[in-house]
C-alpha cells in the first residue's frame, strides 16, 4: 500500500533586517516598506535619511469589523454577521538630507515609492520582530505625502503623515506553511507474498494553522492521477477534480495541476484552465480555520511520483 510521508515545512531565505527600534503599538521591531518594484525602504533605521516618527503611528492593532445584528423581541439584539473591513494605517515619516538637494532627492524618491502603488499595485509594510518572526501587509497610498509648511521645514528636512489603505485587513506571515504528501513504492501482488497496493493516495492528516483567522490554501498535485478529492473532515466540505472532464485525460507522471481556493482557479502546469472539471455545484473550495484541522487527500489512479503539496500563509489580527 502506498506510504504517506510526514509534513515538510520549507521556509524561504529570510530577508536582511535592520536592527529593531521602538515603534508605538508594536514595541521593538524592524519595519521596512517594500515598494511595488521590490525596493526595500527601512523605516526604523534612525541613522538613515528617512525614518518613522515615534508618535502618531496607528493601525497596527486588531482588524476593524462591522457587526450586523437583529433586534431581539425581549430587548437588545442578536449578532447575525461579522464583516472584516479594510484597514487604514497612519504612518508619520521624517525625511532629511545633508543639503537642500539631497533632501529633495530623498523626499521625491520616497514619496514616489508610496504613490506608485496606485499605478503599479500594492506595496508591502513588513514588521520583523527580534525573534525572527516577520509579518506583512499589502498597502496602497491614500493621502498625506505633503510638506508640513512650518518654519525651517522644506530646506534640509520635513515630515509627512501618510495614510495607507489595506484591502485585506490581516497581516500575513512571511514564511509559508507547506505540507507534502506522496506515494511510496508500490509492490508486486505476488512478491514476496500476496499483497495489495492501492491505486489511491489516501492521506488523513491534521493541518495546523498557527494564525488568528482562516486561510485559503493553494494545492499543487503531481501525477499520475485520474481523480483528485480533498475533504475537510470537521465540516464534510469536499471538492473533486475529474481529469476526464478537463479534455486532457489522466494527469501523467510529472504533470501538475494547481488549485487555488482564493481566488478560485484550476490551472494545469501548461497554464490551461480546468475549473470546469470541478464537481460543481457540490464543490466547496474550503478554507482552513485557526488551529488544527483534519483533512483527507485522495488521488485515484496514483502511482510512483504522485504527490500533493498544500501551501498557505498564516494570517494575523495584529502586526
Image (cartoon, helix red, strand yellow):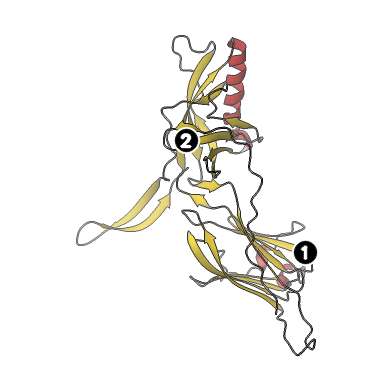
Quadrant assignment for the N terminus: bottom right
| Disc with the residue nearer the chain's start (2 vs 1) | 2
Residue 218 image position (x, y, % from top left): 62, 58
What number is the disc on residue 125?
none
Please tell me how many numbered marks the rendered image carries: 2
17 vs 287: above or below: above
Q: In the image, residue 40 lies at what x, y percent?
A: 62, 33
**Residue 266 appears in the rendering:** yes
**Height in image: 233 above or below 16?**
below
Numbered disc 2: secondary structure:
strand
> Where 300 sits versus 274, above or below?
below
User: Which quarter of the picture shows residue 110?
Assistant: top right
Q: Secondary structure at mark 1?
A: loop
* Residue visible at 20% across and 58% down in the picture: 75
8 left or right of 167? right
Q: Residue furthest left?
A: 74
Q: Which label sits in the foreground, 2 or 1?
A: 2
Q: Which residue is mark 2?
A: 28
Reading the image, the residue beneath label 1 is 255
The one of 37 and 315 positioned closer to us in this rendering: 315
Q: Position of residue 192 (x, y in %)?
A: 79, 87
Which of the two residues, 210 or 225, is positioned nearer the viewer here?
210
10 Å crowding of disc 1: few (<14), some (14-19), many (20+)? some
Q: Residues within 10 Å of mark 2 (few under 14, many from 20)?
A: some
The answer to whether one can see residue 287 in this image is no
Residue 97 at x, y percent in the picture:
58, 15
In the picture, residue 255 is in which quadrant? Answer: bottom right
Residues under numbered marks 2 and 1 in contact, where contact means CB atoms less than 8 Å apart: no
Q: CA distance from mark 2 to mark 1?
A: 46 Å
Amino acid at each position: 500500500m502506498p506510504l504517506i510521508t510526514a509534513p515538510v515545512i520549507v521556509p524561504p531565505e529570510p530577508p536582511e533586517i535592520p536592527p529593531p527600534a521602538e515603534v508605538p503599538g508594536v514595541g521593538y521591531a524592524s519595519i521596512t516598506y517594500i515598494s511595488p518594484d521590490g525596493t526595500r525602504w527601512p523605516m526604523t533605521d534612525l541613522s538613515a535619511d528617512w525614518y518613522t516618527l515615534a508618535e502618531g503611528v496607528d493601525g497596527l492593532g486588531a482588524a476593524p469589523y462591522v457587526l450586523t445584528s437583529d433586534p431581539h423581541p425581549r430587548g437588545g439584539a442578536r449578532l447575525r454577521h461579522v464583516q472584516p473591513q479594510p484597514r487604514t494605517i497612519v504612518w508619520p515619516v521624517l525625511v532629511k538630507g545633508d543639503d537642500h538637494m539631497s533632501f529633495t532627492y530623498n523626499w521625491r524618491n520616497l514619496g514616489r515609492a508610496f504613490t506608485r502603488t496606485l499605478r503599479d499595485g500594492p506595496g508591502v509594510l513588513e514588521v520583523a520582530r527580534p525573534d525572527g518572526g516577520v509579518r506583512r501587509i499589502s498597502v496602497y497610498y491614500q493621502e498625506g505625502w505633503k510638506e508640513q509648511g512650518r518654519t525651517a521645514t522644506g530646506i534640509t528636512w520635513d515630515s509627512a503623515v501618510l495614510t495607507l489603505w489595506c484591502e485585506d485587513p490581516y497581516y500575513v506571515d512571511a514564511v509559508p506553511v507547506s505540507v507534502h504528501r506522496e506515494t511510496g513504492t508500490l509492490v508486486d501482488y505476488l512478491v514476496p507474498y500476496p499483497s495489495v497496493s492501492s491505486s489511491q493516495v489516501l492521506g488523513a492528516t491534521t493541518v495546523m494553522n498557527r494564525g488568528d483567522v482562516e486561510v485559503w490554501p493553494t494545492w499543487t498535485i503531481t501525477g499520475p492521477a485520474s481523480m483528485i478529492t480533498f475533504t475537510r473532515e470537521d465540516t464534510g466540505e469536499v471538492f473533486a477534480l475529474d481529469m476526464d472532464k478537463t479534455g486532457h485525460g489522466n494527469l501523467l507522471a510529472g504533470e501538475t495541476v494547481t488549485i487555488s481556493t482564493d481566488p478560485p482557479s484550476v490551472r494545469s502546469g501548461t497554464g490551461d484552465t480546468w475549473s470546469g472539471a470541478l464537481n460543481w455545484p457540490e464543490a466547496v473550495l474550503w478554507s482552513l480555520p485557526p488551529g488544527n484541522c483534519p483533512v483527507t487527500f485522495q488521488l485515484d489512479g496514483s502511482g510512483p511520483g504522485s504527490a500533493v503539496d498544500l501551501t498557505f500563509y498564516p494570517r494575523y489580527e495584529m502586526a
